[in-house]
């Protein structure tokens, strides 16, 4: 086996011996959350049934919060516990804990919420038209305007033909298989918080505000995140901390599946419209884009989801004039949050569907239409930066077209001998790392620690969440040091002992943190005498320490000089670099049930150097199947702001039998590794939708494409 | 109420609430944690155990029906599932790993009953299991690969 290729924690995972939070022995109280039962209103009081015996319970209300009652997002709007204004159904109002779990569940039935209801704002459409105002004067948490070229001049030219399309996507539940969970433990009289999370640094920040103290945060093995454990765990961490502080006991909260589905964050629903001018040569001359996402009741991370969505709404195509307006709008639904792709899957669905609609409208093959809009030498992005990936993108498209046999298959399918089969493609990119100056602002740092035993430990707070960070990062360090990965340990992320490497999000871990670790490893290598193999390395390292040499090797992010971003005007390089993808999907539609079956998925990805081909392939398969659920079956049904289907039997994620033959192929156009995690989620939904549109010969403008959507399109 | 049954070859006697599920009993009172709660309502297969040789979702198996039965969990099948688990490791079939013990149980049940190495048949056999990370592909490959070996 190649150096460090197999997943490090595979064996205990497969044997079922890896301790996730709820597998760990626990002595203490179980906690629960008392929630609002209206979508919008003013809380009058919480009624605790006087006939019920409350003596074994600890109850926490907002007045028990020693620090600030604010869970920090990009705005300071979301309280840990609301004491007055209720903004969504299920909003946390109080906390309760006791040692006996069944008794705790029973107690929740003896609590009643009295509130004066207000008329709630429940849809993106209503938020957009300002039918009810629940935030500011237009419901917008964040508005972004980007202009490139002069669209006005183009649109007023009578030689142009105009085409419009509105594309809508629904929310999506992460459905990490391990539900959210946290516990607060007394260690030598001090409360430590640990649990299932992606970003210990965020949790530490939130608890500092809540408690006024520095609280040590430790990650437990995490059963999936996909963005759902990015910011949300900060809330539960606050709840266990508050309950532990008041009770003086350890407290654990583990969500049940329904609670997790009903009240945690979801992917942002979106409404994206394009108004496009096509010149007499059939080339896109100008575009007006209106990009709206449903942020839900609180701001959370919505402005940056919006920003990423907007910045992906024109892909890397060569569009000379664009004017874009993007808004993240408030509604009275549970706050939306980060989800693998972070605004990009919505944008790419809309853009790639629009490209197909335009191609069909002017009577051209979608592949040729894309070819004619590829960037060239002087092309710039939506924000005016040079498109450095122009050649790579062209190569990617051509290779994907030939390897997937796109043209021959499309011709074979369109002769009408195979009714209701179709093929579609999506060409897209994903910006690596934080948007804009995010990475400079974070200034992530990493640390390698040399040990007397001749081993090296990575001490950072980037988390393993199933994506393989604890395998890939040691492998990168080992490659840099020229030794085998077995000599590198990956310490469990803990905010008290690990360097602040920032959040585990945005496909940044391999690209940004991996690069920093390589820099630190280079310093270590230079500090040692020459060594030829593992044994010699260990000897050299021991010798180095005995001489009193440095034990700790760090590096800190510094922005590359040639990447310039102007946040105020949205000009310049929005990302450190782009990963590129092209997905081709073939579908078949049952003529009676209108169920769509995906027959094949092909994905070509350009992520620079592939550090671990086995794990990379797994990311692509997993991401594509998640995107398949997003495109076809995953539907959240709300009534009066309340989720009606918070159950796995009513919310259909793909099962093994739904999975078509899949191919995951990589191009390595660059020596440096780039981000991968989000890329396969970005494009597969769009490719599937294009294939469905191809099969039906009509426009498909909504995700998910349920039998109902198809029926409506046919009417 | 009092119950006696066999757990992984050993007789156990427990006093328990009649409303508990087998999963809760195993995890909270008997220290068995290979079975996970992914949904608590029989949809995901993460909580799979054998009861009298039949694979069941322990989260919807009432403790009331436990009297006198034989319960076997992955903890007691380490040797018998070794080849299969090695195949899971080789193929990188576990990402976050939360679904994995349940999938190993389902695959073991499939193979020991003479399940065929045809990937389509394997997919059907995984009917009761959900995995959100892997897209199932590598799990299927791992099971196909292990199907030639003695279970
Ligand atoms: S936890 Fe039992 S089937 Fe999901
Ligand atoms: S590996 Fe995460 S759910 Fe299957």
Image (spheres, coloured by chain):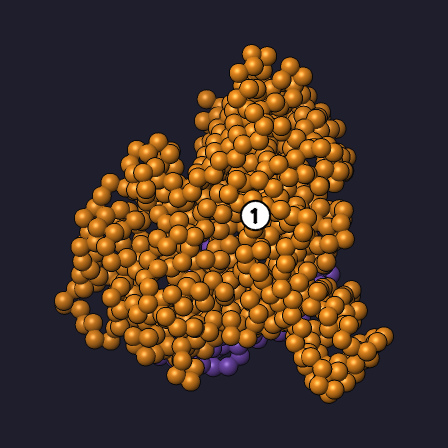
Chain colours: A orange, B purple
The residue drawn where x is 61% and y is 72% is A459
**Disc 1: which chain?**
A
Is A224 situated above or below A457? Answer: above
- Taking the view exactly as shown, the residue that stands out farthest to the bottom is A546
Whether residue A120 can be seen here: yes
Quarter of the rendering containing residue B18: bottom left
In the image, is A353 to the left or to the right of B60?
right
A207 vs A707, nearest the viewer? A207
Image position of A209 (left or right of A370): left
Which residue shows up at 84% across the image and 76% down it?
A530
**Mark 1: which secondary structure?**
loop
Q: Residues within 10 Å of mark 1 (few under 14, many from 20)?
A: many
Residue at 26%, 46% (x, y): give it.
A40
Where residue A367 sits, quadrant-wise, is top right
Task: State the residue position of label 1.
Answer: A436
Query: Where residue A482 sits: x, y (%)?
Result: 79, 69
Residue B46: x percent and y percent? 51, 62
Classify A22 as above or below A310: below
Q: Quadrant of the C terminus of chain B?
A: bottom right
Indicate the position of residue B78 as horizontal and vertical percent values: 62, 74
The quadrant holding residue A638 is top left
| Ligand 2 within 8 angstroms of badge 1 C-beta | no
Residue lying at 17% horizontally and 61% vertically, measured from the top left: A47
Q: In the rendered image, which quarter contains the N terminus of chain B?
A: bottom left
């Amino acid at each position: 086996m190649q150096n460090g290729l197999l997943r490090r924690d595979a064996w205990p995972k497969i044997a079922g011996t890896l301790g996730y939070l709820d597998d760990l022995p626990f002595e203490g109280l179980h906690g629960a959350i008392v929630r609002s039962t209206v979508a919008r209103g003013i809380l009058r009081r919480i009624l605790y049934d006087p006939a019920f015996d409350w003596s074994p319970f600890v109850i926490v209300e907002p007045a028990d919060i020693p620090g600030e009652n604010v869970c920090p997002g990009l705005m300071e709007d979301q309280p840990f516990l609301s004491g007055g204004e209720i903004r969504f159904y299920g909003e946390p109002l109080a906390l309760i804990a006791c040692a006996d779990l069944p008794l705790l569940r029973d107690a929740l039935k003896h609590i009643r919420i009295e509130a004066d209801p207000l008329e709630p704002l429940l849809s993106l459409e209503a938020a957009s038209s300002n039918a009810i105002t629940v935030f500011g004067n237009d419901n917008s948490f964040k508005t972004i305007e980007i202009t490139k070229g002069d669209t006005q001049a183009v649109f007023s030219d009578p030689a142009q033909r105009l085409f419009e399309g509105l594309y809508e996507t629904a929310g999506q539940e992460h459905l990490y298989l391990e539900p959210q969970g946290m516990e607060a433990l007394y260690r030598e009289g001090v409360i430590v918080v640990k649990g299932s999370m992606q970003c210990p640094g965020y949790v530490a920040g939130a608890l500092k505000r809540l408690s006024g103290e520095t609280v040590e945060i430790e990650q437990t093995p995490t059963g999936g995140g996909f963005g759902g454990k990015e910011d949300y765990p900060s809330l539960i961490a606050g709840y266990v901390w508050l309950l532990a502080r008041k009770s003086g006991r350890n407290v654990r909260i583990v969500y049940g599946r329904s609670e997790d589905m009903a009240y945690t964050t979801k992917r942002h629903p979106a409404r994206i419209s394009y108004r496009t001018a096509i010149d007499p040569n059939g080339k896109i001359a100008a575009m007006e884009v209106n990009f709206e996402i449903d942020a839900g009741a609180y701001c959370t991370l919505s402005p940056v989801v919006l920003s990423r969505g907007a910045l992906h709404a024109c892909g890397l195509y060569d569009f000379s004039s664009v004017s874009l307006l993007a808004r993240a709008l408030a509604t009275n639904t549970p706050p939306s949050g980060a989800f693998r792709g972070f605004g990009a899957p919505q944008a790419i669905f809309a853009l790639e569907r629009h490209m197909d609609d335009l191609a069909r409208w002017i009577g051209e093959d979608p592949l040729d239409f894309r070819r004619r809009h590829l960037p060239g030498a002087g092309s710039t992005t939506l924000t005016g930066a040079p498109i450095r990936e122009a050649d790579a993108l062209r190569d990617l498209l051509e290779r994907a077209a030939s390897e997937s046999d796109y043209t021959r298959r499309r011709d074979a399918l369109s002769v009408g001998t195979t009714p209701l089969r179709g093929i579609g493609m999506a060409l897209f990119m994903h910006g690596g790392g934080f948007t804009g100056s995010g990475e400079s602002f974070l200034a992530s740092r990493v640390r390698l620690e040399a040990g007397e035993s001749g081993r090296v430990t990575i001490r950072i707070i980037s988390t393993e969440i199933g994506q393989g960070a604890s395998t890939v990062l040691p492998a990168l360090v080992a490659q840099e040091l020229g030794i085998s990965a077995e000599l590198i340990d990956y310490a469990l992320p803990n905010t008290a002992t690990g360097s602040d490497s920032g959040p585990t999000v945005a496909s940044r871990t391999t690209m940004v943190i991996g690069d920093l670790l390589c820099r630190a490893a280079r310093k270590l290598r230079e500090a040692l005498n020459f060594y030829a193999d593992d044994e010699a390395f260990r000897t050299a390292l021991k010798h180095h320490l005995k001489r009193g040499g440095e034990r700790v090797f760090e590096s800190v992010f510094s922005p590359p000089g040639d990447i310039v971003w102007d946040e105020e005007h949205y000009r310049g390089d929005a990302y450190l670099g782009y990963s590129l993808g092209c997905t081709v999907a073939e579908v078949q539609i049952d003529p009676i049930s209108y169920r769509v079956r995906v027959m094949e998925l092909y994905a070509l990805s350009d992520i620079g150097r592939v550090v671990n081909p086995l794990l990379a392939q797994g990311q692509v398969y997993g991401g594509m199947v998640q995107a398949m659920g997003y495109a076809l079956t995953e539907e959240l049904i709300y009534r009066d702001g309340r989720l009606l289907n918070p159950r796995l039997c009513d919310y259909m994620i793909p099962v093994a039998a739904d999975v078509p033959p899949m191919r995951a192929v990589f191009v390595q156009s660059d020596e440096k590794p780039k981000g991968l995690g989000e890329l396969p989620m970005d494009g597969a939904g769009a490719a599937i939708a294009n294939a469905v549109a191809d099969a039906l010969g009509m426009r498909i403008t909504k995700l998910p494409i349920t039998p109902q959507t198809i029926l409506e399109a046919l009417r | 109420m009092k119950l006696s049954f066999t757990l992984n070859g050993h007789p156990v006697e427990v006093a328990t609430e009649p409303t508990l599920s087998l999963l809760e009993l195993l995890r909270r009172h008997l220290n068995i944690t290979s079975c996970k709660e992914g949904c608590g309502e029989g949809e995901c297969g993460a909580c799979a155990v054998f009861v009298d040789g039949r694979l069941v979702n322990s989260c919807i198996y009432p403790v009331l029906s436990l009297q006198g039965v034989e319960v076997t969990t992955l903890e007691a099948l380490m040797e018998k599932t070794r080849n299969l688990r090695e195949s899971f490791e080789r193929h990188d079939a576990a990402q976050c790993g939360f679904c994995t013990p349940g999938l190993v149980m389902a695959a073991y049940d499939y193979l020991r009953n003479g399940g065929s190495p045809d990937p389509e048949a394997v997919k059907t056999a995984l009917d009761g299991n959900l995995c959100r990370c892997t897209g199932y592909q590598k799990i299927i490959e791992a099971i196909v690969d292990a199907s030639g070996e003695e279970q």
